[in-house]
Structures are given as C-alpha cells and as structure tokens.
Image (tube, rainbow, N blue to C red):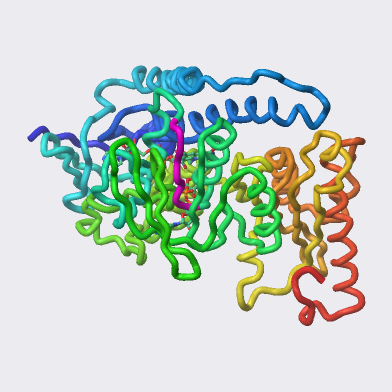
C-alpha cells in the first residue's frame, strides 16, 4: 500500500471538488484530489450541458411547429434523430474537453485515481492501493440517480438521465418516471423532438415549485405539450424484446400496462455519502446519512471535514456546487481559522417552456407554521402584451413581500423567458430591495418585464392593504 501525507484531501473532481481543490491550493495547502469515475464533471458530461443541448434542438423543432401560428409555414420539417444526438454528444464532448484540459494541467502528484473511503477521521484508503493521511478533508462526491426497486433487474430498457446523452439516435417512445426538474426538462424536450413521451408522477409535483397556485398554472401549461399523468404509481415492468411493458397503478386503484422503448427513472438523486466510511469519522449525521454541516462554512461540526456540492444536498445545482466547493476548499486550506463564505440568494431554473423558476424564499418556507404572514402579488402571462405578441402567453408569476417593511422576499413562476425574469428578481432579493424600490426601476415597453411590474404593483397594493386596513397577523397569504 502506498502512503501519502497531505494537508487537504478532496474526494471527487466534479464542479465542487475542482473548486475546492483550487481554493485549498490558493491557501498554500498541499492538496490531493481523488476521483473514482471519469473526469469531466457531472454537469458537463451528463447534466446541465447535454440536457440544455437536447433542449436547444427541441426548441428548434418546436419553433417550426409554432411558426404556423404566425402564418409562417415550414412545410417539410423533418427531425433527424441521429443528427440531433450527434450534435448533443459532439458539443457535450467539447465542454467536457475544457474540464479535461484543466485536470490535465494539474500536477500529477495532486491527482489520485480510485474510490476513497474513510478508515479514520484523518485517514482515507483509495481503492486499497494508497493510504492518505490528511489533516483536512473535503467531501465533494456528488449524487447518483435514484433507482426504483420495482424496476431493478428488468433489462436494458430501464435507464436514467446518465444514459440519455450516449444515445446514437432518438428513441420511438419513453416513459418518464417523476415530474421533477429532470423528468420535465427531458420529457418536454423529447416530446418536442417527436418521441412519444408519457410522464408518470406519484403526486402532482411540478419541478421545484412549491406554490400551489403556480403548480396549477405550470401543470396546465405543460399539459398542452406533454402527456402528464399525475397520481400514478409504478408497479413494475417487464422487458419484452426492444420494449418495456410498464405497469402503473392509478389513483382509482386500477392498473394499466403500456409499452415503451425506454423507461427513464427521473425520481430524484441520492447524495454519494454511503459506502465512503463515514462511520469511521465520528461525525454527527442526519437521518439521510449526510454529516451535519454549517451552510456558511461547509464545516461538519467542529471537525476538519467539509462537505460541498450535491453530496450535502443543500441546493443541488451547479452554481451552488461551485460556491460550496470554494468555501469548503478555502476553509480546509486555512483550518482551524474557518470563515463564513459568500452565499447567494437561492435561484433554481428548470429549462422547460415556459421556464419554471424559483428564487429567494419559497412559498413553502414562508408558509411554514410559526412564520409571519406574507403578502402575495401575481400576474398571469396569458394576456401579457409581449408574451402574446410572441405566442408564448402561458404561465403565472407570484411574488412575495413582507408586511410592514415592504421587503421583497422571493418568487415562484412558470413564465416565458423566466430564466431572465428570475435573475432580475434574484438580484433585487439579494440586494434586499423593497417592492417600492423595485417599482422605481426602469421598465421598457413592450417587454415581458412589464408582467413583473404588474405582479409587483399587485404585491405593493396587498402589502399596503395588509399594513393599513388589516392586522397582518390575521391576513392569509395572497390577501
Ligand atoms: C440531467 C441533469 C441536468 C442538470 N441540469 C442543471 C442545470 O441546468 N443547471 C444547474 O445548475 N444544475 C443542473 N444539474 C445539477 C448539477 O449538474 C449538479 O448540481 C452538479 O453537477 C453537482 O456537482 P458536484 O461537484 O457536487 O458533483 P459531481 O460533478 O457529480 O462530482 C462528484 C465526483 O465525485 C466522484 N466520487 C464520488 N464518490 C467518490 C469516492 N468515494 N471517491 C472518489 N471519487 C468519488 C464522482 O465520480 C464524481 O466525479 C443537472 C443535473 C442533471 C443530472
Ligand atoms: N435546470 C436545473 O437546474 C436542473 C436540471 C436537472 C436536474 N437538476 C438537479 O438534479 C436534481 C435531481 O432531479 P430530479 O428531477 O431527478 O429530482 P427532483 O427531486 O426534482 O424530482 C424527483 C421527482 O420524482 C418523484 N419521485 C420520487 N420518488 C418516486 C417514486 N418512488 N416513484 C415515482 N416518482 C418518484 C418526486 O415526486 C419528484 O417529482 C434536482 O433536484 C436538481 O437539483 C437541476
């Protein structure tokens, strides 16, 4: 067994791990980065980038169809599935290439290949070939798609998002299990590319939304394009040649069986904190097995162990993985002088159309028992000027504000160009602006942002009403 002694060991070379490695090195710490899988990051290989490439192709296909609404007829449109997937893989490989280049330029002594696991609070063993004595550790092991037990061992037709971006051609049909972010992004993209898609959901969840009014509006908008089947439970499946016969149970109790080329499990992701010897660290862990950590420092208790990215499941999206990694690596490098790092206003965007975006405090957080009442303003995009002009008049925006101070708290939306509206609102939220201050900002004409102004005016009115005419404590959200 080889022996290695370092100041900092970073487990994982994804976005969080790479950012932790750089930050620890910047503190002058001797650092090793350990990776068990392929280099290239989940985001670039099988996450953000290839999924957005597939969505971009689907938008092109959708525009051809939507054009007839303007009197423009793209007569002979044809989707070449092989060419679509070839571009997805080619461009994805280009993005992966940038990551591989940066890893290539790291000193060889700073990289170790193999599965790392703790054998003690300050020791790791890598694949039984190297023992690493490390004064500090950053766990940046990412997450893995949840596999449904009732679909285990069925056959090659049962897949996860990890498989989609290696396809050589578009399939004929896909059943998507889960109406979360992955299920809806991929489900809508594949449907727009001519694949027969059905999305099966246990409940009525729509991506990351928590506001029931926005959930309703988003579900309505998406249903225009996707065969979305709420309240269905997967019972089991059988691989039958090139197809999978999928059996689901409906809310009525009846069961139906349908055949698809693939069944895509999009039922969440599990943090990779199991099988890494955490039981040897003495760290306190939550019910989900994740070490208890401080989200400002990423430190696990008072220990020299830090946890970053999807592994801690705090906000499992790319920008947060990068921020987590920087904070964790910086603190691992400077330990025991641990400092709080920069955390930003929460922002999540699902690239469906309409975009589904949430920022700041969620409706669910604000509505938790014991929390003060809050005011709500809203706008529907169905009759919003510019949205109608572009034939993208679907969706709803709800904005939340604090009674008394008038401070803007957060928003949830399914909105045309929602990715941009969400940034605008997230910046206002992080700047701790009041609704009044936001309404003093410029709004051009005719733009979708005028819809945001309508929602903010509505919110301002409701805040005013709550503060002057009613006791805030008696008012319900939305009044
Ligand atoms: C389909 C899909 C689409 C997405 N789209 C978006 C998007 O549009 N926008 C967005 O912000 N986010 C998106 N995400 C989420 C984003 O990709 C993740 O939040 C981010 O990549 C997490 O980075 P990470 O560094 O935590 O994990 P990863 O990049 O997964 O890195 C973890 C690394 O640790 C390694 N590892 C694990 N265990 C060990 C061990 N014991 N020893 C050694 N190495 C180990 C793994 O092999 C892996 O390389 C998407 C995710 C998916 C799946
Ligand atoms: N645009 C983005 O930012 C983006 C895109 C894709 C993925 N991601 C990240 O990846 C994470 C994982 O995405 P996801 O869509 O897999 O998870 P998710 O948590 O968003 O959704 C999982 C869905 O699966 C359902 N589900 C859970 N268990 C089930 C079961 N046993 N049977 C049927 N349905 C079940 C849930 O009700 C939910 O609707 C997201 O939380 C997000 O952080 C982000």
- Looking at the rendered image, the quarter that the N terminus falls into is top left
Residue 138 is situated, as x and y percent measured from the top left of the image, at: 34, 44
Q: Is residue 219 above or below residue 10?
A: below
Foreground pick, 116 / 167 = 167
Q: Which region shows up in magenta?
A: 171-178
Q: What residue is rendered at 41% in x and 33% in y?
A: 164
**Residue lying furthest left in this view?**
1
Could you tell me what secondary structure mostly forms the magenta stretch? strand
Residue 288 visible here = yes
Verify whether residue 71 appears in magenta.
no
Give left or right: position of 378 versus 186: right
Q: Is residue 199 above or below residue 40?
A: below
Q: What residue is rendered at 35% in x and 58% in y?
A: 290
Can you tell me which quadrant of the image ligand 1 is in?
A: top left
| Total number of numbered discs in the rendering | 0
Residue 27 visible here = no
Residue 83 is situated, as x and y percent measured from the top left of the image, at: 49, 17
């Amino acid at each position: 067994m080889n022996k290695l002694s370092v100041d900092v060991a970073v487990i994982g070379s994804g976005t969080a791990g790479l950012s932790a490695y750089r930050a620890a090195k910047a503190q002058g710490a001797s650092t090793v980065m350990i990776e068990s899988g392929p280099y290239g990051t989940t985001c670039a290989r099988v996450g953000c980038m290839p999924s957005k490439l597939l969505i971009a192709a689907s938008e092109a296909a959708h525009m051809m169809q939507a054009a007839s609404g303007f009197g423009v007829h793209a007569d002979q449109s044809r989707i070449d599935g092989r060419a679509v997937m070839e571009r997805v893989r080619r461009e994805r490989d280009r993005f992966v290439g940038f990551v591989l280049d940066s890893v290539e330029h790291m000193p060889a002594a700073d990289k170790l290949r193999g599965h790392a696991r703790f054998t003690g609070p300050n020791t790791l063993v890598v694949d039984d070939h190297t023992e690493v004595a490390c004064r500090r550790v950053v766990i940046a092991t990412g997450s893995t798609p949840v596999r449904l037990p009732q679909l285990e061992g069925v056959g090659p037709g049962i897949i996860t998002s990890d498989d989609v971006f290696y396809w050589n051609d578009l399939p004929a049909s896909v059943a998507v299990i889960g109406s979360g972010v992955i299920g809806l992004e991929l489900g809508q993209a594949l449907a727009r590319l001519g694949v027969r898609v059905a999305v099966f959901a246990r409940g009525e969840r729509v991506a990351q939304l928590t506001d029931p009014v926005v959930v309703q509006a988003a579900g309505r908008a998406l249903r225009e394009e996707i065969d979305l089947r709420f309240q269905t439970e997967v019972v089991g499946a059988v691989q039958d040649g090139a197809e999978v016969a999928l059996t689901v149970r409906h809310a009525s109790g009846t069961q139906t069986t349908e055949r698809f080329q693939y069944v895509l499990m999009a039922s969440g992701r599990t943090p990779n904190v199991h099988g890494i010897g955490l039981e040897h660290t003495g760290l306190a862990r939550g019910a989900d097995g994740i070490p208890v950590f401080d989200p400002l420092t990423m430190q696990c208790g008072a220990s020299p162990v830090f946890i970053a990215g999807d592994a801690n499941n705090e906000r499992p999206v790319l920008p947060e993985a990068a921020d987590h990694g920087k904070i964790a690596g910086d603190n691992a490098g400077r330990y025991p002088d641990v400092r709080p790092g920069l955390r930003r206003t929460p922002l999540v965007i699902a690239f469906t159309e309409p975009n589904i975006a949430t920022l700041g405090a969620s409706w669910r957080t604000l509505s938790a028992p014991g929390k003060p009442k809050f005011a709500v303003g809203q706008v529907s995009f169905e009759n919003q000027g510019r949205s109608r002009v572009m034939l993208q008049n679907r969706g709803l925006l709800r904005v939340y504000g604090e009674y008394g101070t008038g401070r803007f708290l957060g928003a949830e939306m399914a909105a045309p160009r929602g990715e941009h509206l969400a940034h605008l609102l997230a910046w206002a939220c992080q700047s701790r602006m009041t609704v009044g201050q936001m309404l003093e900002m410029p709004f051009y004409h005719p733009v979708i942002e005028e819809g945001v102004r309508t929602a903010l005016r509505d919110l301002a009115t409701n805040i005013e009403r709550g503060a002057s005419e009613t006791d805030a404590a008696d008012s319900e959200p939305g009044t």
